[in-house]
Image (cartoon, rainbow, N blue to C red):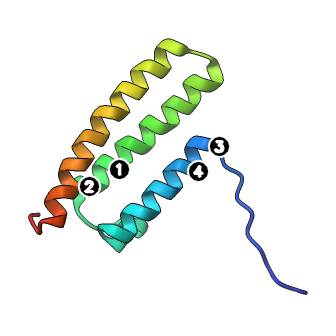
Amino acid sequence: MGKLIEVQIRTFLQHAWAQFSEKLSDEVDSAIKYGGGNKELISLLAMLSDATMDVEIAIKAKDANRMAIELQRSAGLFGRLQEIIHRLREGKR
């Protein structure tokens, strides 16, 4: 006995974000976990984080229009993210 455990309570989107950011850190740059790495990538991740939060707020408010807007914004950001990741994997900064 006497062992500490960590319990995390997350919404579905929070969990998806956590899994995504862990995977990205593992596959692209481990510095991402600690706020480091490619500045363009970090900036885009911050925007995606904000968009994810805004989707959660829209869901809670049952605001379908706002949810659609934020999901569209997220889709565009993910497209840009794919481009950056591709560049980084090819060794182009």
Q: Which residue is mark 1?
A: 45
Q: Which residue is mark 4?
A: 15
Badge 1: few (under 14), some or many (20 or more) residues near its Cα, within 10 Å?
some
Inspect the image, locate mark 1, and give the three-letter code of the amino acid beneath it.
Answer: Leu
Q: Identify the residue at the far left of this view.
A: 92
Rounded to the nearest angstrom, the CA distance separating label 3 from label 2 is 24 Å
Q: Earlier in the sequence, mark 3 or mark 2?
A: 3
Image mark for residue 11: 3
Question: For the residue labelled by badge 1, is the local secondary structure a helix, a strand or a loop?
Answer: helix
Question: For the residue labelled by badge 2, is the local secondary structure a helix, a strand or a loop?
Answer: helix
Observer-side mark, 4 or 2, equals 4
Inspect the image, locate mark 4, and give the three-letter code of the amino acid beneath it.
Answer: His
Q: Position of residue 35 (x, y in %)?
A: 37, 64
Q: Position of residue 1 (x, y in %)?
A: 91, 87
Rounded to the nearest angstrom, the CA distance separating label 1 from label 2 is 6 Å
Q: Earlier in the sequence, mark 4 or mark 2?
A: 4
Q: Earlier in the sequence, mark 4 or mark 1?
A: 4
Rounded to the nearest angstrom, the CA distance separating label 4 from label 1 is 15 Å
Q: Which residue is mark 2?
A: 41
Nearest to the observer: residue 61 or residue 19: 19
Locate the C terminus by quadrant: bottom left
The reply to whether callout 1 and callout 2 are in contact (CB within 8 Å) is yes
